[in-house]
Image (cartoon, rainbow, N blue to C red):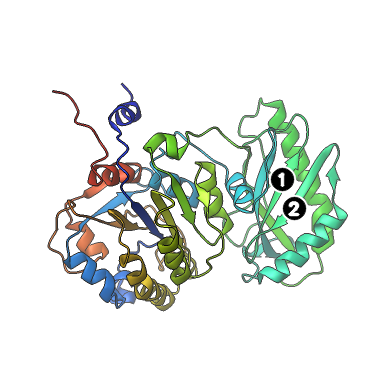
C-alpha cells in the first residue's frame, strides 16, 4: 500500500485549527565570520522563546532529499505534504496563478526576472538591482505593447513584484517543461532553452517560440538601465495535483504577499486571502478569518531576501520583526502551530541550500523538548529529529488527533 493511501484511510475530520507559518529561507549556517552564530541564534526573539518554554517539539527538516537544494516550489510543496519529487511544478505556473492569471489547458508559463546585461550579453546582475515594482510594470507594458504574438502563439505578459514578471504562451501544440533561459549565476550569457525530452515535438516547438520571443523582446529594452535584459525559468504547463481539502479534510487559506506563494497555495486548492502586506497585518487577518478556515498557511518572505543578499544583520532584523508581531497570532493560538522555513538560505552562500531547516511544533500534546530557544542548535537536540519536510503535515495532523488508530 502506498503510504499516502494509508494516511488518507486514517484521516479524520476533527475541526481542529492549524497554522503553518513559514519564514522563507529561515535556516542558516554558523561561520567564523558570523561569530559562529546563525541569524536565528543572534536575533532577539522573546516571543518565540516564551512559546518554546511553554512546550514545543523541535527538529530539522530535509526539504527534498539529502544534498538536494530546492527551489521555492519544491520547498513549499514539501511543507504542504506533497512529495516534491513526485509532484514537479514549473515556477512559471506557480507565479502565473499567484498573479491571478486564469490558465487554460495547453498554456505554457515562464517565470522571468529583469536582469542587467553587458555589451556582450553577459549577465552582470540577475535581478537588475531589484528594480522597484513600478519600473517592472513599465517594462512589461513596453513589451506587451510590441509583442502580442510569436507566430501563431499568443503572448501574455504580467508584472509581479520588483524585478519579477510572468510570460504565458497560449497556442496549439505547446508543452513544457523546458530548460531555463537563466545561467543561475552572474558572469555567463543567457543559455538557449531546450526540450527536457528531445523527442517531444511540442517541447521543440515551445523552445523555438521562446527563442523567437527573445529575439523580439531584447531589442525593445536594450537601452533601459539597469534592466536591459531578462531571464526565464520554470517553463512548464500546469500539472494535476490532489486538492488539499480532500487530502486533509480541512478548509485551507493562504496569507501571502508575493505572487509565487499565492500561486503555490492556489495550485493545491487553498483560498487566497488578499490584502495584508506586512506580517503584522497577516497575523491580524488570521485572527479575523479564524472561524472561516481550518488551516492557515502564512508566508513571510524577507528572511529569504536578506539571505540571498548575504546580509546577516538584515536577516536577523527580519526575524526580530516577525517575533515582534507573533503575539497577535498567539492571542488566538491554533490547536497546532508549526513555524519553520521552506529551505535554508545561508547568508554565507547568498542562495538556497540543502541544509535542513529548523522546525518548531506546538500543540497541547506536542510535549516539551525542554529547550530555551528556537534555533538551529536547539532544533538539532529536539525530539522530532531530522525528517523529510513532506511529513510535517502528518506530524501536524497527529498533533490534532486527526488520525484513526492503525491496526488492532
Between 171 and 343, the residue placed more toward the observer is 171
Q: Position of residue 244 (x, y in %)?
A: 44, 39
Task: Residue under label 1, please give it.
Answer: 168
Task: Answer with the quarter of the image where residue 357 lies.
Answer: bottom left
At label 1, counting other C-alpha atoms closer than 10 Å, the crowd grade (few under 14, some 14-19, many 20 or more) is many
Can you say whether 307 is above or below 396 in the image? below
**Are discs 1 and 2 less than 8 Å apart at CB?**
yes
Q: Is residue 114 visible?
A: yes
Task: Residue under label 2, please give it.
Answer: 157
Q: Position of residue 379 (x, y in %)?
A: 22, 59
For the point 66% across and 25% down, the residue is 199
Q: Position of residue 221 (x, y in %)?
A: 80, 63
Q: Is residue 259 left or right of residue 139?
A: left
Q: Is residue 151 left or right of residue 111?
A: right
Q: Is residue 194 left or right of residue 63?
A: right
At label 2, counting other C-alpha atoms closer than 10 Å, the crowd grade (few under 14, some 14-19, many 20 or more) is many
Q: Position of residue 276 (x, y in %)?
A: 52, 66
For the point 43% across and 49% down, the residue is 75
Task: Answer with the quarter of the image where residue 331 lies.
Answer: bottom left
Between 262 and 68, the residue placed more toward the observer is 262
Amino acid at each position: 500500500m502506498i503510504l499516502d493511501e494509508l494516511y488518507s484511510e486514517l484521516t479524520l475530520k476533527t475541526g481542529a485549527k492549524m497554522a503553518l507559518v513559514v519564514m522563507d529561507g529561515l535556516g542558516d549556517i554558523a561561520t567564523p565570520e558570523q561569530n559562529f552564530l546563525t541569524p536565528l541564534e543572534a536575533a532577539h526573539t522573546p516571543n518565540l522563546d516564551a512559546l518554546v518554554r511553554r512546550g514545543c517539539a523541535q527538529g530539522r527538516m530535509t526539504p527534498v532529499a539529502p544534498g538536494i537544494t530546492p527551489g521555492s516550489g519544491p520547498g513549499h510543496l514539501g511543507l504542504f505534504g506533497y512529495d516534491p519529487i513526485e509532484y514537479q511544478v514549473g515556477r512559471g505556473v506557480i507565479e502565473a496563478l499567484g498573479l491571478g492569471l486564469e490558465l487554460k489547458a495547453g498554456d505554457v508559463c515562464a517565470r522571468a526576472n529583469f536582469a542587467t546585461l553587458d555589451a556582450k550579453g553577459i549577465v552582470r546582475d540577475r535581478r537588475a538591482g531589484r528594480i522597484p515594482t513600478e519600473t517592472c510594470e513599465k517594462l512589461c507594458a513596453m513589451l506587451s505593447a510590441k509583442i502580442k504574438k510569436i507566430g501563431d502563439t499568443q503572448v501574455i505578459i504580467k508584472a509581479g513584484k520588483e524585478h519579477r514578471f510572468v510570460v504565458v504562451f497560449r497556442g496549439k501544440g505547446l508543452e513544457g517543461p523546458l530548460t531555463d533561459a537563466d545561467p543561475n549565476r552572474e558572469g555567463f550569457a543567457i543559455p538557449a532553452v531546450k526540450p527536457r525530452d528531445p523527442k517531444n515535438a511540442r517541447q521543440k516547438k515551445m523552445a523555438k517560440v521562446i527563442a523567437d520571443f527573445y529575439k523580439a523582446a531584447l531589442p525593445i529594452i536594450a537601452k533601459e538601465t539597469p534592466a536591459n535584459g531578462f531571464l526565464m525559468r520554470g517553463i512548464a504547463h500546469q500539472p494535476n495535483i490532489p486538492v488539499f481539502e480532500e487530502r486533509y479534510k480541512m478548509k485551507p487559506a493562504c496569507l501571502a504577499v508575493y505572487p509565487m506563494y499565492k500561486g503555490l497555495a492556489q495550485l493545491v486548492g487553498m483560498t487566497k486571502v488578499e490584502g495584508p502586506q506586512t506580517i503584522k497585518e497577516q497575523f491580524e487577518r488570521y485572527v479575523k478569518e479564524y472561524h472561516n478556515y481550518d488551516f492557515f498557511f502564512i508566508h513571510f518572505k524577507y528572511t529569504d531576501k536578506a539571505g540571498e543578499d548575504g546580509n546577516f544583520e538584515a536577516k536577523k532584523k527580519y526575524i526580530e520583526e516577525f517575533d515582534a508581531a507573533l503575539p497577535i497570532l498567539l492571542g488566538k493560538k491554533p490547536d497546532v502551530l508549526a513555524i519553520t522555513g521552506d529551505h535554508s538560505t545561508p547568508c554565507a552562500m547568498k542562495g538556497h541550500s540543502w541544509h535542513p531547516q529548523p522546525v518548531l511544533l506546538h500543540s497541547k500534546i506536542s510535549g516539551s523538548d525542554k529547550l530555551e530557544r528556537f534555533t538551529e542548535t536547539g532544533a538539532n537536540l529536539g525530539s522530532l529529529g531530522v525528517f523529510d519536510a513532506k511529513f510535517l503535515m502528518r506530524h501536524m495532523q497527529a498533533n490534532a488527533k486527526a488520525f484513526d488508530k492503525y491496526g488492532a
